[in-house]
Amino acid sequence: MTVVVLGGAGYIGSHTVDRLVEKGYDVAVIDNLITGHRAAVNPKARFYQGDIRDRGFLDRVFGTETNVEGVIHFAAFSIVPESMENPLKYFDNNTGGMITLLEAMKDHDIKRIIFSSTAATYGEPKQIPIKETDPQIPTNPYGESKLCMEKIIKWADKAYGIKFVALRYFNVAGAKDDGSIGEDHHPETHLVPIILQVAAGERDGLKIFGTDYPTKDGTNVRDYVHVMDLADAHILALEYLKDGHDSDAFNLGSSTGFSNKEILEAVRKATGQPIPAEDAPRRAGDPSTLIAASDKARKILGWKPQYDDVEEIIRTAWNWKQSHPKGYNDRGEA
Ligand code: UFG
Protein backbone atom coordinates (compact mmCIF):
# COMPACT_ATOMS: atom_id res chain seq x y z
CA MET A 1 0.00 0.00 0.00
CA THR A 2 1.23 3.47 -0.89
CA VAL A 3 0.88 6.87 0.72
CA VAL A 4 0.74 9.69 -1.84
CA VAL A 5 2.10 12.96 -0.47
CA LEU A 6 1.14 16.09 -2.39
CA GLY A 7 3.52 18.95 -1.74
CA GLY A 8 6.06 16.44 -0.44
CA ALA A 9 8.99 18.60 -1.57
CA GLY A 10 7.92 21.53 0.61
CA TYR A 11 8.97 22.33 4.15
CA ILE A 12 6.48 20.30 6.20
CA GLY A 13 5.83 17.81 3.39
CA SER A 14 9.49 16.83 3.04
CA HIS A 15 9.84 16.21 6.77
CA THR A 16 6.70 14.07 6.71
CA VAL A 17 7.94 12.08 3.71
CA ASP A 18 11.21 11.52 5.54
CA ARG A 19 9.40 10.24 8.62
CA LEU A 20 7.06 8.03 6.56
CA VAL A 21 10.04 6.43 4.79
CA GLU A 22 11.86 5.97 8.09
CA LYS A 23 8.78 4.18 9.46
CA GLY A 24 8.68 1.83 6.48
CA TYR A 25 5.77 3.28 4.46
CA ASP A 26 5.85 3.10 0.67
CA VAL A 27 5.71 6.74 -0.45
CA ALA A 28 5.01 8.56 -3.71
CA VAL A 29 5.47 12.34 -3.82
CA ILE A 30 3.71 14.85 -6.06
CA ASP A 31 5.09 18.39 -6.23
CA ASN A 32 5.19 21.11 -8.90
CA LEU A 33 8.46 22.43 -7.40
CA ILE A 34 7.19 26.03 -7.52
CA THR A 35 8.11 26.44 -3.87
CA GLY A 36 9.34 22.92 -3.08
CA HIS A 37 12.81 21.45 -3.59
CA ARG A 38 13.57 18.18 -5.34
CA ALA A 39 16.59 17.71 -3.05
CA ALA A 40 14.31 17.82 0.00
CA VAL A 41 12.55 14.59 -1.01
CA ASN A 42 13.85 11.41 0.57
CA PRO A 43 15.38 9.36 -2.29
CA LYS A 44 13.40 6.29 -1.24
CA ALA A 45 10.14 8.02 -2.27
CA ARG A 46 8.98 7.96 -5.91
CA PHE A 47 8.68 11.46 -7.33
CA TYR A 48 6.17 12.95 -9.81
CA GLN A 49 6.57 16.55 -10.86
CA GLY A 50 3.27 18.20 -11.67
CA ASP A 51 0.43 20.40 -10.45
CA ILE A 52 -2.59 19.35 -8.40
CA ARG A 53 -4.78 21.56 -10.58
CA ASP A 54 -3.87 19.38 -13.57
CA ARG A 55 -6.51 16.66 -13.59
CA GLY A 56 -4.83 14.69 -16.40
CA PHE A 57 -1.58 14.62 -14.44
CA LEU A 58 -3.33 13.40 -11.26
CA ASP A 59 -5.09 10.68 -13.28
CA ARG A 60 -1.73 9.52 -14.65
CA VAL A 61 -0.19 9.36 -11.16
CA PHE A 62 -3.20 7.57 -9.64
CA GLY A 63 -3.24 5.30 -12.68
CA THR A 64 0.35 4.29 -11.91
CA GLU A 65 0.09 4.24 -8.12
CA THR A 66 -2.84 1.86 -8.00
CA ASN A 67 -2.69 0.76 -4.38
CA VAL A 68 -3.10 4.04 -2.47
CA GLU A 69 -4.10 3.72 1.20
CA GLY A 70 -4.26 7.46 1.72
CA VAL A 71 -3.27 10.89 0.54
CA ILE A 72 -1.46 13.50 2.62
CA HIS A 73 -2.01 16.90 1.08
CA PHE A 74 0.40 19.80 1.75
CA ALA A 75 0.40 21.36 -1.71
CA ALA A 76 -0.68 24.94 -1.09
CA PHE A 77 0.51 28.53 -0.99
CA SER A 78 0.88 29.73 2.61
CA ILE A 79 2.13 33.31 2.81
CA VAL A 80 -0.37 35.51 4.63
CA PRO A 81 0.77 38.91 3.30
CA GLU A 82 0.95 37.62 -0.27
CA SER A 83 -2.61 36.31 0.08
CA MET A 84 -3.78 39.81 1.06
CA GLU A 85 -2.34 41.20 -2.19
CA ASN A 86 -3.26 38.30 -4.46
CA PRO A 87 -6.25 36.45 -2.98
CA LEU A 88 -7.28 34.75 -6.22
CA LYS A 89 -3.90 32.98 -6.43
CA TYR A 90 -4.78 31.40 -3.08
CA PHE A 91 -8.34 30.43 -3.94
CA ASP A 92 -7.20 29.01 -7.27
CA ASN A 93 -4.35 26.87 -5.97
CA ASN A 94 -5.46 26.00 -2.45
CA THR A 95 -9.23 25.75 -2.79
CA GLY A 96 -9.40 24.94 -6.51
CA GLY A 97 -6.54 22.44 -6.16
CA MET A 98 -8.47 20.64 -3.43
CA ILE A 99 -11.52 20.27 -5.69
CA THR A 100 -9.44 18.76 -8.51
CA LEU A 101 -7.69 16.45 -6.09
CA LEU A 102 -10.98 15.25 -4.55
CA GLU A 103 -12.46 14.62 -7.99
CA ALA A 104 -9.45 12.50 -8.89
CA MET A 105 -9.60 10.66 -5.55
CA LYS A 106 -13.30 9.95 -6.06
CA ASP A 107 -12.73 8.53 -9.54
CA HIS A 108 -9.77 6.41 -8.41
CA ASP A 109 -11.62 5.22 -5.30
CA ILE A 110 -9.13 6.68 -2.80
CA LYS A 111 -10.96 7.15 0.48
CA ARG A 112 -8.59 8.86 2.94
CA ILE A 113 -7.04 12.31 3.01
CA ILE A 114 -5.00 14.10 5.67
CA PHE A 115 -4.53 17.75 4.82
CA SER A 116 -2.91 20.93 6.10
CA SER A 117 -5.35 23.39 7.53
CA THR A 118 -4.23 26.28 9.70
CA ALA A 119 -4.68 28.40 12.78
CA ALA A 120 -5.36 31.17 10.29
CA THR A 121 -8.87 29.70 9.77
CA TYR A 122 -9.83 31.04 13.23
CA GLY A 123 -8.96 34.67 12.54
CA GLU A 124 -8.92 36.89 15.63
CA PRO A 125 -9.89 34.42 18.36
CA LYS A 126 -12.59 35.15 20.93
CA GLN A 127 -10.83 33.04 23.55
CA ILE A 128 -7.33 31.66 24.19
CA PRO A 129 -6.36 28.85 23.94
CA ILE A 130 -8.29 28.23 20.72
CA LYS A 131 -10.42 25.08 20.62
CA GLU A 132 -11.37 23.19 17.46
CA THR A 133 -15.02 24.08 18.05
CA ASP A 134 -14.34 27.85 18.20
CA PRO A 135 -15.68 30.11 15.42
CA GLN A 136 -13.63 30.15 12.22
CA ILE A 137 -13.62 33.69 10.85
CA PRO A 138 -10.38 34.20 8.92
CA THR A 139 -8.78 37.65 8.69
CA ASN A 140 -6.85 36.88 5.51
CA PRO A 141 -7.45 35.06 2.19
CA TYR A 142 -4.89 32.38 3.06
CA GLY A 143 -6.98 31.36 6.09
CA GLU A 144 -10.19 31.67 4.07
CA SER A 145 -8.83 29.48 1.27
CA LYS A 146 -8.04 26.78 3.85
CA LEU A 147 -11.42 27.13 5.56
CA CYS A 148 -13.08 26.61 2.17
CA MET A 149 -11.02 23.43 1.81
CA GLU A 150 -12.34 22.21 5.17
CA LYS A 151 -15.93 22.92 4.11
CA ILE A 152 -15.57 21.27 0.71
CA ILE A 153 -14.08 18.08 2.14
CA LYS A 154 -16.95 17.75 4.64
CA TRP A 155 -19.44 17.57 1.79
CA ALA A 156 -17.19 15.25 -0.22
CA ASP A 157 -17.14 12.96 2.81
CA LYS A 158 -20.95 12.97 3.05
CA ALA A 159 -21.45 12.39 -0.67
CA TYR A 160 -18.56 10.09 -1.60
CA GLY A 161 -17.33 8.70 1.74
CA ILE A 162 -13.87 10.29 1.45
CA LYS A 163 -12.70 10.36 5.08
CA PHE A 164 -10.51 13.26 6.13
CA VAL A 165 -8.43 14.67 8.94
CA ALA A 166 -7.87 18.44 8.84
CA LEU A 167 -4.78 19.40 10.82
CA ARG A 168 -4.85 23.04 11.88
CA TYR A 169 -1.23 23.98 12.36
CA PHE A 170 -0.12 26.84 14.48
CA ASN A 171 3.39 28.21 13.82
CA VAL A 172 5.81 25.66 12.50
CA ALA A 173 9.57 25.92 12.99
CA GLY A 174 12.71 23.80 13.25
CA ALA A 175 14.36 21.17 11.07
CA LYS A 176 15.27 17.51 11.15
CA ASP A 177 17.78 16.87 13.96
CA ASP A 178 20.68 15.95 11.69
CA GLY A 179 20.27 19.15 9.66
CA SER A 180 19.81 17.23 6.39
CA ILE A 181 16.46 18.87 5.54
CA GLY A 182 14.96 22.16 6.70
CA GLU A 183 13.07 25.30 5.80
CA ASP A 184 13.99 27.07 2.53
CA HIS A 185 11.48 29.60 1.19
CA HIS A 186 12.09 32.17 -1.55
CA PRO A 187 11.36 34.81 -0.49
CA GLU A 188 11.40 33.98 3.22
CA THR A 189 8.59 35.61 5.20
CA HIS A 190 8.45 33.60 8.44
CA LEU A 191 9.75 34.94 11.70
CA VAL A 192 12.22 32.27 12.84
CA PRO A 193 14.08 31.78 9.53
CA ILE A 194 14.19 35.55 9.01
CA ILE A 195 15.80 36.08 12.43
CA LEU A 196 18.26 33.29 11.59
CA GLN A 197 19.13 35.08 8.34
CA VAL A 198 20.01 38.12 10.46
CA ALA A 199 22.04 35.89 12.81
CA ALA A 200 23.91 34.53 9.77
CA GLY A 201 24.67 38.04 8.53
CA GLU A 202 22.42 37.76 5.45
CA ARG A 203 20.10 40.54 6.58
CA ASP A 204 20.91 43.74 8.44
CA GLY A 205 18.20 43.40 11.05
CA LEU A 206 14.76 42.16 11.99
CA LYS A 207 11.72 44.37 11.51
CA ILE A 208 9.17 43.62 14.24
CA PHE A 209 5.78 44.09 12.62
CA GLY A 210 3.53 45.84 15.14
CA THR A 211 4.37 46.71 18.74
CA ASP A 212 0.95 48.03 19.78
CA TYR A 213 -1.04 44.79 19.99
CA PRO A 214 -2.94 44.01 23.22
CA THR A 215 -0.31 41.44 24.31
CA LYS A 216 2.30 41.19 27.08
CA ASP A 217 4.90 43.28 25.21
CA GLY A 218 2.80 44.70 22.36
CA THR A 219 4.01 42.20 19.75
CA ASN A 220 2.05 39.29 18.25
CA VAL A 221 1.94 36.06 20.22
CA ARG A 222 2.24 32.73 18.41
CA ASP A 223 2.37 29.04 19.35
CA TYR A 224 5.42 27.22 17.92
CA VAL A 225 5.53 23.54 17.08
CA HIS A 226 8.45 21.53 15.70
CA VAL A 227 8.18 20.36 12.11
CA MET A 228 9.05 16.74 13.05
CA ASP A 229 6.27 16.72 15.64
CA LEU A 230 3.89 17.90 12.92
CA ALA A 231 5.17 15.13 10.64
CA ASP A 232 4.36 12.55 13.31
CA ALA A 233 0.84 13.95 13.69
CA HIS A 234 0.12 13.29 9.99
CA ILE A 235 1.13 9.66 10.32
CA LEU A 236 -0.99 9.26 13.45
CA ALA A 237 -3.93 10.84 11.59
CA LEU A 238 -3.52 8.41 8.69
CA GLU A 239 -3.49 5.46 11.08
CA TYR A 240 -6.52 6.91 12.87
CA LEU A 241 -8.50 6.86 9.62
CA LYS A 242 -7.18 3.42 8.72
CA ASP A 243 -8.50 2.21 12.08
CA GLY A 244 -11.96 3.19 10.83
CA HIS A 245 -12.47 6.37 12.85
CA ASP A 246 -14.57 9.21 11.52
CA SER A 247 -13.41 12.42 9.86
CA ASP A 248 -12.31 15.19 12.21
CA ALA A 249 -10.22 18.35 12.68
CA PHE A 250 -7.37 18.79 15.18
CA ASN A 251 -5.26 21.72 16.32
CA LEU A 252 -1.52 21.11 16.34
CA GLY A 253 0.38 23.44 18.63
CA SER A 254 2.35 23.45 21.85
CA SER A 255 -0.36 25.27 23.84
CA THR A 256 2.26 27.87 24.84
CA GLY A 257 2.49 31.38 23.40
CA PHE A 258 5.65 33.35 22.62
CA SER A 259 5.65 36.99 21.58
CA ASN A 260 7.72 38.03 18.59
CA LYS A 261 10.12 39.79 20.99
CA GLU A 262 10.43 36.61 23.08
CA ILE A 263 11.26 34.64 19.95
CA LEU A 264 13.90 37.22 19.08
CA GLU A 265 15.44 36.75 22.55
CA ALA A 266 15.29 32.96 22.23
CA VAL A 267 17.10 33.13 18.88
CA ARG A 268 19.73 35.45 20.38
CA LYS A 269 20.31 32.83 23.10
CA ALA A 270 20.29 29.82 20.77
CA THR A 271 22.71 31.42 18.29
CA GLY A 272 24.81 33.62 20.58
CA GLN A 273 24.40 36.46 18.05
CA PRO A 274 23.29 40.00 19.01
CA ILE A 275 20.66 40.28 16.15
CA PRO A 276 19.69 43.92 15.63
CA ALA A 277 15.93 44.60 15.49
CA GLU A 278 13.69 47.61 15.00
CA ASP A 279 10.00 48.30 15.51
CA ALA A 280 7.97 48.47 12.30
CA PRO A 281 4.28 49.01 11.40
CA ARG A 282 1.77 46.18 11.71
CA ARG A 283 1.63 43.65 8.87
CA ALA A 284 -1.81 43.42 7.23
CA GLY A 285 -3.88 40.38 8.19
CA ASP A 286 -1.98 39.42 11.37
CA PRO A 287 -4.17 38.34 14.29
CA SER A 288 -2.91 39.49 17.67
CA THR A 289 -2.58 36.14 19.51
CA LEU A 290 -2.81 32.53 18.32
CA ILE A 291 -2.39 29.77 20.90
CA ALA A 292 -3.75 26.26 20.40
CA ALA A 293 -5.66 24.02 22.71
CA SER A 294 -4.07 20.81 21.44
CA ASP A 295 -5.34 18.31 23.98
CA LYS A 296 -7.75 16.85 21.41
CA ALA A 297 -4.88 15.69 19.15
CA ARG A 298 -3.01 14.36 22.19
CA LYS A 299 -6.02 12.48 23.48
CA ILE A 300 -7.61 11.16 20.30
CA LEU A 301 -4.63 10.76 17.95
CA GLY A 302 -2.18 9.93 20.78
CA TRP A 303 0.08 12.80 19.62
CA LYS A 304 3.07 13.40 21.90
CA PRO A 305 5.21 16.28 20.66
CA GLN A 306 8.90 15.62 21.42
CA TYR A 307 9.97 19.27 21.39
CA ASP A 308 8.51 21.37 24.19
CA ASP A 309 11.28 23.97 24.41
CA VAL A 310 11.20 26.77 21.87
CA GLU A 311 14.95 27.33 22.14
CA GLU A 312 15.53 23.68 21.25
CA ILE A 313 13.23 24.08 18.22
CA ILE A 314 15.25 27.13 17.16
CA ARG A 315 18.53 25.24 17.64
CA THR A 316 17.45 22.61 15.12
CA ALA A 317 16.61 25.38 12.62
CA TRP A 318 19.99 27.03 13.30
CA ASN A 319 21.75 23.71 12.78
CA TRP A 320 20.11 23.41 9.33
CA LYS A 321 20.89 27.04 8.52
CA GLN A 322 24.56 26.69 9.43
CA SER A 323 25.01 23.46 7.51
CA HIS A 324 23.02 24.82 4.49
CA PRO A 325 23.71 28.57 4.36
CA LYS A 326 22.16 28.77 0.87
CA GLY A 327 19.36 26.30 1.62
CA TYR A 328 19.00 23.62 -1.05
CA ASN A 329 20.68 26.00 -3.51
CA ASP A 330 18.56 24.69 -6.38
CA ARG A 331 17.17 28.01 -7.63
CA GLY A 332 20.28 28.95 -9.61
CA GLU A 333 21.11 31.74 -7.18
CA ALA A 334 24.63 32.86 -6.33
N1 UFG B 1 7.07 38.87 11.80
C1 UFG B 1 7.84 40.00 12.05
N2 UFG B 1 8.87 40.27 11.20
C2 UFG B 1 9.16 39.50 10.12
C3 UFG B 1 8.36 38.34 9.87
C4 UFG B 1 7.32 38.07 10.74
O1 UFG B 1 7.62 40.73 13.01
O2 UFG B 1 10.10 39.85 9.38
C5 UFG B 1 5.96 38.56 12.71
C6 UFG B 1 4.61 38.53 12.05
O3 UFG B 1 4.05 39.83 11.92
C7 UFG B 1 3.85 37.65 13.03
C8 UFG B 1 4.91 36.66 13.53
O4 UFG B 1 6.16 37.26 13.21
O5 UFG B 1 3.41 38.42 14.09
C9 UFG B 1 4.85 35.31 12.89
O6 UFG B 1 4.76 35.51 11.48
P1 UFG B 1 4.99 34.33 10.43
O7 UFG B 1 4.92 34.94 9.06
O8 UFG B 1 6.22 33.59 10.81
O9 UFG B 1 3.77 33.34 10.65
P2 UFG B 1 2.20 33.70 10.86
O10 UFG B 1 1.92 33.91 12.28
O11 UFG B 1 1.78 34.72 9.88
O12 UFG B 1 1.56 32.29 10.52
C10 UFG B 1 0.39 32.20 9.80
C11 UFG B 1 -0.56 31.18 10.43
C12 UFG B 1 -0.04 29.80 10.29
C13 UFG B 1 0.31 29.56 8.88
C14 UFG B 1 1.30 30.58 8.42
C15 UFG B 1 1.63 30.39 7.00
O13 UFG B 1 -0.75 31.45 11.77
O14 UFG B 1 -1.02 28.88 10.66
O15 UFG B 1 0.73 31.85 8.53
O16 UFG B 1 2.45 31.41 6.53
F1 UFG B 1 0.78 28.32 8.68
Image (spheres, rainbow, N blue to C red):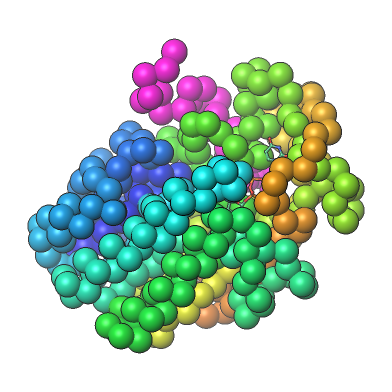
Q: Position of residue 109 (x, y in %)?
A: 18, 75
Q: Position of residue 294 (x, y in %)?
A: 63, 70
- The reply to whether residue 296 is visible in this rendering is yes
Foreground residue, 180 or 330?
330
Q: Residue 41 occupies which quadrant of the picture?
A: top left
Q: Is residue 95 above or below residue 247?
A: above
Residue plotted at (73% across, 68% down)? 125
Considering depth in this image, is 127 or 308 the residue closer to the camera? Answer: 127
Q: Which residues are magenta?
A: 307-334
Looking at the rendered image, the quarter that the N terminus falls into is bottom left
Magenta highlight on residue 332: yes
Q: Which quarter of the image is occupied by the C terminus?
A: top left
- Identify which residue is drawn at 66% across, 40% down: 191
Query: Residue at horizontal 45%, vertical 44%?
Result: 11
Residue ID at (72%, 35%) = 267
Labels in figure, total: 0
From the viewer's perspective, is 120 left or right of 23? Answer: right
Residue at the top extreme of this rendering: 334
Q: As rendered, which of 149 and 203 lies closer to the eye?
A: 149
Rendered location of residue 77, percent (x, y): 46, 48
Q: Is 70 colored magenta in this rendering? A: no
